[in-house]
Structure formats: C-alpha cells, structure tokens
Image (spheres, coloured by chain):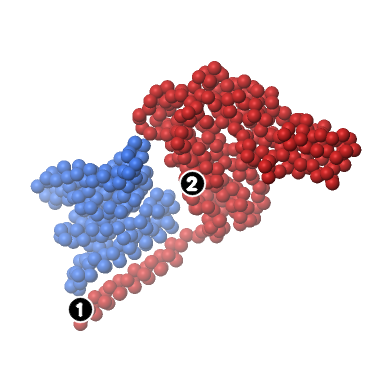
Chain colours: A blue, B red
Amino acid sequence: MEYVGKIFVILISSILINNFVMSRFLGICPFLGVSKRVETAVGMGAAVTFVMAMTSLITYIIQYVILEPLGLEYLQTIIFILVIASLVQFVEMVIQKTSPTLYQALGVYLPLITTNCAVLGVAIINIDEKYDLIQALFNGVGAALGFTLAIVLFAGVRERLELSDIPKPLKGFPIALITAGLMSVAFLGFQGLIK
Amino acid sequence: MEKILLSLLSLGGMGLLFGAVLAFASKRFAVEKDPRAEAIREVLPGANCGACGYPGCDGFADAVASGKAPVDGCTVGGSPVALKVGSIMGVEVEEKERHIARVLCQGDCHNAVNKYEYRGIQDCVAASMLASGPKGCSYGCLGLGTCVRACPFDAIHISDRGIAVVDPDRCTGCGKCVEACPKNLIELIPESSLVQVLCISKDPGKQVRENCKVGCIGCRLCVKACQFEAIDFVDNLARIRYDKCVNCMVCAEKCPTGAIYADFSKRKVAFIDEDKCIGCTACKRVCKFESIDGERKQKHRVLADKCTGCGQCVERCPVDAITLSVRGN
C-alpha cells in the first residue's frame, strides 16, 4: 500500500508540482512551436506521452543492464540521446506500417521529439532519483501528462489571444511568451502540495 | 586504457546495433507507396492549404493516385498543375480559366455608415452575431479580418478605409476566404471578367441609400443599358452573368451610385484594318452602339468615342479585318 502511495505521489508531483514545462523549463521548443491550435497540441501531447513512456522503460534497462555493470555512467547522456533518437525512428516506422490511422494522428509529431530535451530529461531524472522500473514508468507518463496539460492549456489561451486586440509590438510571440510566464507563475501555486 | 576501449566499444557497438535495427526496420516495415503519388506531390504547389478538401498536398496526391480525387482538383495550381498531374496519371485535362476572389462590397468608412461602435472580439464572425455587425448595412464587409486570417497566401488585406481587399496577383482562387466570410461577401470570379456588381444588399433602394453611398439601389438602369442580357435582377439587386458579359462596361457607366465596378483601364476598342475591309456593312449592322461608320462598298471606320469594345463586330466580320486592343495603347 505504501508503494502505491509513493507511485501516486510521483505521478502528482511530475504532472503538477514539477511540471516539465512550467517548473523545470524543459521541452519549451515544442511548447511554443506546436501550441497554436488545441488540436495539434493534443496530438503533440499524445506523441510525447507515448515516447516518454517508451523511453523511461528502455533507458532504465540500458542504465542498469549495460552502463552500470560496465562502469560507464559518464556516457549516460550521449547513449540516452542515441537510444531515444533511434527508438523514435523505429516506432515511427512500425506505426506507419501497422496502423495508418495512428500514424496520421502521431506521425508528424514523432520526428519533432526525437531530440527533445524533455524526453532526455525524464530519462536522466529517473536515474538520478533512483526510481525502480515501475516508478520510472509512472514518472515518465506523469511528466508527459504534465507536458500535455501545459501545452493544451497554453494552446487554448493562444487561440483566444489570436482574436484579441493586442498592441502591435506584442502581437504573436511576445504575448505568447508573456502568457507562458504567467502560466508558469500560476503553476508555482502547486509547490508545497506534497511535503 | 581499458576504460577508453570499453567506452568506445560499447558506444560504437550500440550505435552499430541501432543502425542495423533501423536499417532492417526500414526494409521490413517499408510501406509500398504509389510512385505516381510521389510524382504528383512533386508538381503540386506545396502550400498545404487544404482547398482541395484533403489534408495537405500529400493527402491530395494520394487521393489522385488512387483515383478518388479529380486531376484538376488543385485550385491553387490551376491549369498548369492540372496539366502536369494529368500527364502523370495519363488523363486529358481541359483548360480551365483562373478564378480570383473578389470582395463584393465597397462600403468603406467613407461610403458606409455604422450603427454602433464595436469593441468586442476583433473577428467578423463574433461581430456579426451582435445585430449582424456594426455596419449600417447588414450585408456589408465588417473589415475585422476573418478572411485575412483564413487566407493561406497572404492575398487579402484590410484596407486603410476598413474593408477587405483582395490582391489579384497573389490570389490563387482557393476559396478559403469564401468559406470564412460570415457575410458571404466574397465570390470567385473568372479572371477575364472586368465588370462586377460590388454590392450584395437586398434591401430596398431607399434603405441602401441611407446606409451606403455606393450600394445597389435597384434602379435597373444597368439592366436597361445592357445590350447582351448579361444582367439578372433579383431581390432588388443586379447580378452580372459572367458567361454572357462581354466587358463592354456600359452598365458601369450608367450606374448612378457606382456600385458596378469596371476596370476602365482595360477597356478595349475595335480597329478596322482598311486593307482587309470589303465594305460589307456586317459590322455596322451588328454594332449595338452605332459606333461604326461607312456606307456599303466603302471602307468602314470605328468611332472610337462610341465604341465600347464589346467585340461583336470582331466575331461577325467575314474577313477578320477587325481587331480589339486595349484603349490608350
């Protein structure tokens, strides 16, 4: 029971308190790039969720089966990048072959996240926090859900901003960055939710 | 030394392994693509505007290759692209005239009155929900740029006077703005058509006059003036039939409010080559504006101030002695 409680804490923590975009400032590139419309934001979120779950799993195995026994922890970053990039490419090919519908929904976003820092971040945090496999998986999924939450909310705000009468110098990216900042401040409110 | 070797080997080995897996996967999971789809994709404009009804140019190329979409479905590319796509698919394609979007309203801030000041969401759809918009004329252009945002080609802009204007050079006739406009004010018009009724108000003349200086007041002067039955008159509003209009521009001259627009700089004039003219008077008889002078067996002459450039005489002349050219040249 205590274990389930811990997993729950990890999930809540990675979704809200240590939100990848809003608190850790990882994955800002897709956060700003693919957040013009809610529809695409949801697609991106789904793709990230999928990739982060896979990554958490694979990098965990690589870390404890290959890197640690060989004493190669210092190669962690570069190997994780290698693993993530090839994994995403591989998954993209498999999806394209097996499920054209899923490929239509996720296909365009998958190449975008091959070298996303948020994905690498979750892999490294998993190791740093000394999570076990299940916890790592939940941390990955939680982080991705947090990313999805942030990007979808942000896209909703941006859709409304499009129609507002914004002073000319602030139109487009400036107001988007200000909005992102304000959202980040709002997410600060979750700090201290869990002791 | 051992450590360096170990790290080199493990990193290199992993790289090699992943590379091999990817290479294998790309063969194993290769999706057979129709080579024609890729060839079609090459000749498409690549704007991914979606005007064809498919998600982007890739979707359209696939649909054409599998026979679901017509070869001339890309409105943006027009005939040149349709011809190329047709040759890839091995189909004959008819030449189609290019169409250009036109905003059928001239009710800018100088010409039309507003009934209230609008400060809400800067969007025509939102504004039109509030008593059909701030403009006095409920048919008029609101100028809040819904069409501008819909245009994938940056071909439509809000003028200084506050209504939407299409840039004909950039317009590809994709029809996105036509769908976006909540007032149904934008129409795709054949490129060769130089005369348009720039008003869609169905209000009675008196009311139109109160709201707008350049609206169609339903006086029917244009209908009487038109010699070619190219103007329909329905619901207090003149409409030009582009298939019958010969661009003589007489209606635009007669229109008392200026609601009919004609590009007078492109107005044509007939010219008779006296060497070829045999004096048969065929052109004189067919001319509806009495602009051809000359007796039987004599060389004919065009009275340039009366000629409207309608081109009837050109078609009628048995010896091809008449040519049309743009006035001023």
- Observer-side mark, 1 or 2, equals 2
Label 2 secondary element:
loop
Q: For mark 1, name the chain.
A: B
User: Residue at label 2?
Assistant: B153
Can residue A4 be seen here? The reply is no
Considering only vertical position in the picture, is B237 above or below B100? above
Give the CA separation, mark 1 to mark 2.
Answer: 58 Å
User: Quadrant location of the C terminus of chain B?
Assistant: top right
Q: Can residue A58 be spotted in the picture?
A: yes
Instruction: Find residue B3 and name its label.
Output: 1
Q: Quadrant of residue A178?
A: top left
Q: Residue at x 64, y 40 (%)?
A: B266
Q: Exactly how many numbered labels are in the figure?
A: 2
Location of residue A97 by image quarter? bottom left
| Residue displayed at 43% across by 32% down | B124
For the residue marked with disc 1, what is the amino acid?
A: Lys
Pointer 2 chain: B
Tell me the kind of residue under disc 2. Answer: Phe
- Report the front residue among B60 and B46: B46
Residue B176 versus residue A62: which sits nearer the camera?
B176
**Residue at the left extreme of this rendering:** A195
- Which of B152/B117 is in front? B117
Question: Is residue B52 found left or right of A121 in the rendered image?
Answer: right
Q: Position of residue B166 (x, y in %)?
A: 52, 40
Q: Residues within 10 Å of mark 2 (few under 14, many from 20)?
A: some
In screen coordinates, is A27 left or right of A36? left
Percent from the top left, x then y, of residue B110? 48, 28
Q: Which mark is residue B166?
A: none
Q: Residue furthest bottom?
A: B1
Which residue is at a point 72% across and 34% down the rendered structure image?
Answer: B305
Q: Judging from the image, what secondary structure is the residue with disc 1 in?
A: helix
